Amino acid sequence: MTNLTPEPVQPSPLDDDNLDGFTVDALSDYLDHGRQPRNSDIEGSAAAQHALAALSRLRTVAPRIVNADAEYFTPKHENWITRILDQIGVQAHAGRDIPIPYDVAGAELSITEGAVRALVREAGDETDGLLVERTSLDGDLTTPGAPVEVHVVVSTFATTNDARIVPSFRERVIATVREHTDLVVARVTVRVHDSDITDEDLDDDGNLVPR
Amino acid sequence: MVSLPGRDSLSDADDRTVASRAADGDIRAFEVLMRRYGPLLRAYAARIVRPADADDVVQDTFVTAWQELPDLENPAVVRSWLTTIVTRKSIDRLRAGREHDSIDDHDFHDHADGPEDVASASSLDEALSLVLSSLPEDQRRCWVLREIAGYGYTEISEQLGLPVSTVRGLLVRSRKTLVREMEAWR
């Protein structure tokens, strides 16, 4: 940090007197076009070069200016997040209603697709070493007994042993869905970045086998 | 039944992971995104709309983001995607304002906590931030849309309802002022 205050009036490379007859507008256009096609008048003028360099520097600094602002503009009231959450809470992604059979005439129970996906994410949160990114339930969720496929995309931490963690997570997903719904889970696919792990990759004990 | 999912690990996770998770419907992950980029988006909006309107613009931005996140193809670019939305929302707000009133608000830093004048700035970035604040609104908007949002002259002209020649003139003036300050720091 310095106490030196910049002089308010100093010659600038963009002053009309310093432009060698060129305009800031024309030089900006030239810069915008990547200095193509090459203009030998501009390239041969020291003043124009000086101005181009300044415009180019300003362009480099531009994103930093708004970043520098951000610390001043941090909302003062913590409740700004709550306000937004309140507003989007009513339009959370609930998805389809999955019926839960119940032996009472006239009673209709259901759980939303969004809630089941949240349970799958939660199963991931309870598994050390991975984070669930995306979930989806494919199939006819609204018809009891129809086969359903569960697809999960996870990222694993660098230290994670995928071969050990992923199969146990997969078991946990199956158990969770069975516990909370009557869905008939026909298939569970866990994708770790670019590799899929399905039934074919696991032996009878649920361990990962090479393809 | 559902506890707060993985909050600790989420707040440290990269944009792609957090945005994917938010797109999946996890509101806690979305909250992480809001904390991460809310101040930046607010600073950005305050450069285009009146500072007093910036909060509303940011709120609209995040509500739209929540709705549209599931369709974002590459969650790793969530930051620039949010910037695109906040630009659109800011311009919408400007247009709505133009229809209702024409009061200009030049008291930009009345609403900010930053230093009051350029002389007290402790870095080039901060000094330029203050110079940007002191620019007339039209110059500031044109410059932000061109240099931060990457809009072309015609696009700025259409969005702000100004002739292209005027946009060019405003950009020249804003560049001259900013470069003068920038050079003073060299």
Image (tube, coloured by chain):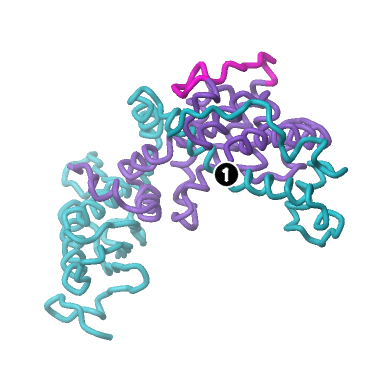
Chain colours: A cyan, B purple
- Residue at 54% from the left image edge and 34% from the top image edge: B44
Give the magenta range. Answer: B98-116
**Residue B157 seen:** no
Residue at mark 1:
A61
Residue drawn at 19 percent across, 71 percent down:
A161
Q: Please give the name of the residue rendered at 38% of the width and 41% of the height, measured from the top-left corner.
A: B36
* Residue B185 in the image, given as x and y percentages of width and height: 57, 37
Instruction: Specify the quadrant of the image occupied by residue A168.
Output: bottom left
Q: Position of residue B163 (x, y in %)?
A: 82, 33
Amino acid at dot 1: Val
| Viewer-nearest residue: A100 or B45 | B45
Residue B31 versus residue A160 in the image, above or below: above
Q: Position of residue A155 (x, y in %)?
A: 30, 62
In the displayed structure image, the side of residue B174 where residue A147 appears, left or right: left
Q: Position of residue A189 (x, y in %)?
A: 30, 68
Secondary structure state at the residue bearing disc 1: helix
Residue A92, picture quadrant: top left
Would you call the spot at circle 1 few (<14 residues within 10 Å), some (14-19), or many (20 or more)? some
On whether residue A148 falls in the magenta region, the answer is no
Q: Quadrant of residue A134?
A: bottom left
| Residue at the (57%, 33%) spot, across then down | B128
